[in-house]
Image (spheres, rainbow, N blue to C red):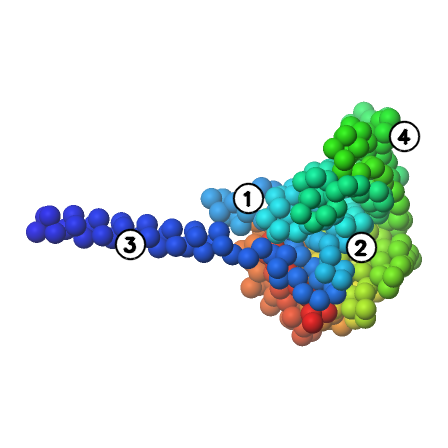
Amino acid sequence: MLIKYFRNIRFFIFLISALTLNTSAHAFNKPPAVDLVKGDFSIMVLGSGGPAALGDANGGSGRASSSYLIFIDGKPKILMDAGGGAFKNLAESGSNIKDLDIVLLTHLHLDHTGDLPSIIKTLYFHNSIYNINNQTFPPGRIKPFRVFGPATNGMAFPPSLGADPSTTQYSSTSTYVDKHFDLNSGTERYLNIFTRATSAGIFKYEATDSSPQWTSYNPRVILDENGLVITAVGVNHGPVPNVSYRIEYKGKSIVYSGDTSSRKVDPQGNPLENGGNMISISENADILIYDAGLGTDIPPSPAFEFFYKLHTTPSRMGEVAAAANVKMLMLSHITLQSENEIPNMKDLIRNQGFVGRIEATQDLEVYNLLAR
């Protein structure tokens, strides 16, 4: 009897091992996310999470921080934010970014910019001998990559910190990019010679600042070429300069909020038309990607009150999406607080009259707007 028991145990262990190996093999053979890109206008999620590194062991889901890759005519053309983990997900996606041309930064928090230098470097590797199978070597990349983001809002540090009074809490995007890549002063200035030495091309970039002013609606078209139109407008993220983007191509549109609060009044307490620009920039959008870092409308404890000044409540998302007649609302920047509240968040959004599709984004998902 005892021998039979141990035989059964060994068989059970063998069965579990076989199932595990089969599952692992299936996951290993899963087609890369880039194979899901179909048609002329698509978006791939490189990072759907917030700033905290939280895996299964502590209640999170292992999401990378905020980042999205937009495909135009089947090629990755636009990178929106580049938070930590985006580089790894880019590699896992199977995407070749040799044609990446535009970087849109909503604001300069690390969970939206941390992987940018690594992605820029691999952009050149994808144009070098490492990419010989795609026939881009030689001569490597010649044209510059273009970075767009917020200008500084001029806000200084509190005097108690002892900073120089002329020092702002946030630099402009152009200053930020120069401090990374400028030939004379950039921390990654070696790329200017590295790309030549490895036959990856000529390292060049352009940086453009957009006003983060959010107390009135002043959208700016920052790019209009070959049917692709990108508009930027400032939105409220507390003291942080933040711009939202609208990307339009062939009659379809994607809007990305970056991080923004629910505040509907200006710093003096005056009511704002449309509650701070998000309704206007999102009007009739096919996809609205929204900051969903808050899982409830009311802070669960006083410790969370600070975050409620910077991010959007579920009801406010529903209000914006309904008023703007958005077709699909994608919940982004999902945090530990919102991860476990998604069903409740969807109810709160619906309660505001939004009848479109709601998706809680996951890393490496693909959405095709012009699928053939």
Say what secondary structure mark 1 lies in.
Answer: loop
Left or right of 91? Residue 39 is right
Tell me the amino acid under the disc marked 4. Ser
Q: Earlier in the sequence, mark 4 or mark 1?
A: 1
Which residue has dot 3 on it? 15
Left or right of 60? Residue 186 is right
Q: Earlier in the sequence, mark 4 or mark 2?
A: 4
Separation of residues labelled 4 and 1 (CA atoms): 37 Å
Which residue has dot 2 on it? 244
* Whether label 3 touches label 1, CB < 8 Å: no
Residue neighbourhood size for the residue with mark 3, other residues' Cα within 10 Å, grouped as few (<14), some (14–19), many (≥20): few
Say what secondary structure mark 2 lies in.
Answer: strand
The residue that appears at 85% across and 29% down in the rendered structure is 183
Query: Residue 221's quadrant in the figure?
Result: bottom right
Separation of residues labelled 4 and 3 (CA atoms): 67 Å
Q: Earlier in the sequence, mark 4 or mark 3?
A: 3
Tell me the amino acid under the disc marked 3. Leu
Total marks shown come to 4
Q: Earlier in the sequence, mark 2 or mark 3?
A: 3
| Residue 203 is at least partly visible in this image | yes
Tell me the amino acid under the disc marked 1. Leu
The residue that appears at 77% across and 50% down in the rendered structure is 99
